[in-house]
Amino acid sequence: MTIDKIKNIIVDNVGNKVKIIYNGSRNKVEEYSGVIVETYNYIFIVKLDTKETMSFSYTDVLTNCIELNF
């Protein structure tokens, strides 16, 4: 999969619910759920259910640092 394909999938799902699984260091796994709010050239913004906003890069998805479930 390429970054362009990943970006197109995320752009198509703007406004939809998403579950994000973040694979951090030292086998630390965090889960977030929210809505994709905006997309930019290198990052996308997710408004979490806890009213926080987080940004992730498309390369995070490409390198499997995060997993997206729509």
Image (cartoon, rainbow, N blue to C red):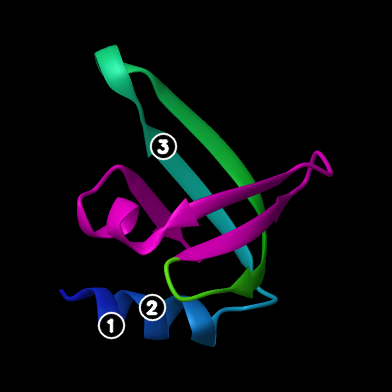
Residue 46 to residue 65: above or below: below
Q: Dot 1, how many residues are within 10 Å of its Cα: few (below 14), some (14-19), or many (20+)?
A: few
Q: Relative to the observer, which residue lies in front, 34 or 5?
A: 5
Q: Which residue is mark 1?
A: 4
| Magenta residues (range) | 43-70
Does the CB distance between marks 1 and 2 fall below 8 Å? yes
Farthest-out residue, right = 51
Left or right position of 8 against 14? left
Q: Position of residue 20 (x, y in %)?
A: 49, 48
Separation of marks 3 and 1 at Cα, in angstroms: 21 Å
| Corner quadrant of residue 16 | bottom right
Q: Position of residue 8 (x, y in %)?
A: 39, 86
Q: Which residue is mark 2?
A: 7
- Residue at point 62%, 78% (across, down): 14
- Residue at point 31%, 57% (across, down): 61
| Amino acid found under the numbered disc labelled 3 | Tyr
| Amino acid found under the numbered disc labelled 2 | Lys
Q: Quadrant of the N terminus?
A: bottom left
Residue 30 sits inside the magenta stretch:
no
